[in-house]
């Protein structure tokens, strides 16, 4: 009798074990397999949210098949305490495991409403936009010039929302003075700036910040990123450059940045100036002359006069030999790379080609012909042709 009872108990235990193993296997497949979400959503994880709250919220949105399985899977992987507040884009069919990785990842929001404070060479503007999760496209909500326009009420309403992301974007080629002046007008920043950072040492990039962030600390972050970039690229530089310090390389990078906005042209433009330095020719580049006139505090907005091209100052490369004493703007990584690894060419001249790019020449005669063509294009434009 006892033998039969023991045998039956063992059989039941085996069956239960098989069932448990099967359930666990099914749950594991549910956790790592494709999710049920049919349409992309922007899911918000509130500050201080618990895992069970997020799990239930995801189930309500149709992003996970089971809040319980989601929570168990997160617990098993040791991610239960790793939630990061923010708004996250979740694509259709995303597995629960990947969703957990999203909400417990970097904490950087990937959707929702964003204020983008854009500091450009010619102007600064504030753009408020919201990502449409379905189309994965941003929809513009508010746009204004913080220097000229009254602050719209729509902007203030959005800016006061704690969930609104704030981003500051520095365009390549802005000057340090322009950056500081723009940051002074940013109402969401705090603290004073005691001095303008050295020209060229702010990294043009996108910076996500929190309301009330320190202006001084933000500038320090921009400097740290730029110096790290220079150090890294200097270690990868070509071996035959006509300048032997990272500082000089940064000066060249700033000139390249101001001379062309066409990415693929940067190494070629750099090669022209490198070739000129090697041959002892003056650089003769207008952006340096303009910087000598404005100090980087304004856009000239007109052509250079002959008297200005002949004026003796440290930045007039029509007069001085070699490089000017400092950078003339804050160059981006591509321009720094181009200055430190220029293309191999015999070019000594270039001029605008009328399409936004440039045409290059090896001889003065060839260059003069290119200049003549450019003047014809300018004449046609002025005549309305």
Image (cartoon, rainbow, N blue to C red):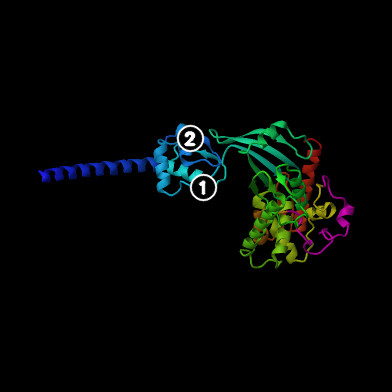
The image quadrant of residue 67 is: top left
Residue 264 pos. (x, y %): 64, 51
**Identity of the residue drawn at 77% across and 54% down:** 196
**Identity of the residue drawn at 67% across and 43% down:** 211
As helix, strand or loop, the secondary structure at mark 1 comes to loop
State the extent of the magenta-drawn residues as a range: 300-329
Give the Cα distance between marks 1 and 2.
18 Å
Q: Considering depth in this image, is 292 or 12 the residue closer to the camera? A: 12
**Identity of the residue drawn at 44% across and 34% down:** 59
Q: Considering depth in this image, is 218 or 48 the residue closer to the camera? A: 48
Residue 105: image tag: 1
Residue 353 pos. (x, y %): 73, 47
Q: Quadrant of the N terminus?
A: top left
Answer whether residue 307 is magenta in the image: yes
Is 6 on the left-hand or right-hand side of 190?
A: left
Answer whether residue 142 is magenta in the image: no
Residue 26 pos. (x, y %): 33, 40
Q: Does the magenta stretch mainly form a helix, a strand or a loop?
A: loop
The tag earlier along the polypeptide, 1 or 2, is 2
Q: Nearer the viewer, mark 1 or mark 2?
A: 2
- Residue under circle 2? 57
């Amino acid at each position: 009798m006892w033998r039969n009872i023991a045998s039956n108990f063992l059989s039941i235990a085996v069956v239960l074990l098989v069932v448990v193993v099967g359930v666990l296997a099914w749950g594991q497949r549910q956790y790592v397999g494709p999710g049920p979400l049919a349409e992309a959503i922007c899911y918000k994880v509130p500050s201080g949210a618990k895992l069970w709250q997020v799990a239930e919220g995801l189930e309500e949105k149709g992003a996970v098949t089971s809040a319980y399985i989601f929570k168990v899977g997160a617990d098993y992987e040791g991610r239960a305490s790793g939630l990061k507040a923010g708004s996250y884009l979740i694509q259709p069919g995303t597995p629960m495991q990947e969703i957990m990785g999203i909400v417990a990842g970097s904490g950087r929001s990937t959707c929702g409403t964003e204020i983008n404070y854009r500091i450009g060479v010619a102007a600064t503007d504030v753009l408020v936009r919201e990502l449409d999760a379905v189309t994965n496209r941003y929809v513009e909500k508010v746009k204004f010039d913080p220097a000229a326009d009254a602050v719209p009420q729509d902007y203030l309403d959005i800016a006061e929302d704690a969930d609104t992301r704030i981003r500051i974007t520095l365009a390549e080629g802005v000057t340090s003075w322009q950056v500081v002046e723009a940051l002074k007008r940013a109402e969401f920043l705090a603290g004073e700036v005691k001095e303008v950072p050295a020209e060229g040492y702010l990294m043009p990039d996108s910076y996500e910040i929190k309301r009330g962030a320190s202006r001084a600390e933000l500038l320090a972050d921009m400097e740290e990123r730029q110096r790290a970039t220079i150090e890294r690229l200097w270690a990868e530089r070509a071996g035959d450059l006509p300048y032997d310090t990272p500082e000089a390389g940064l000066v060249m990078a700033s000139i390249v940045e101001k001379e062309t906005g066409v990415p693929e042209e940067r190494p070629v433009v750099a090669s022209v100036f490198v070739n000129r330095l090697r041959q002892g020719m003056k650089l003769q580049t207008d952006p340096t002359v303009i910087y000598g006139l404005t100090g980087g505090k304004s856009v000239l907005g007109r052509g250079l006069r002959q008297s200005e091209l002949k004026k003796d100052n440290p930045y007039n490369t029509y007069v001085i030999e070699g490089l000017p004493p400092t950078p003339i703007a804050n160059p981006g990584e591509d321009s720094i790379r181009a200055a430190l690894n220029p293309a191999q060419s015999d070019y000594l001249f270039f001029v605008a080609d009328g399409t936004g790019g440039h045409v290059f020449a090896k001889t003065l005669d060839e260059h003069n012909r290119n200049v003549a063509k450019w003047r014809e294009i300018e004449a046609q434009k002025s005549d309305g042709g």
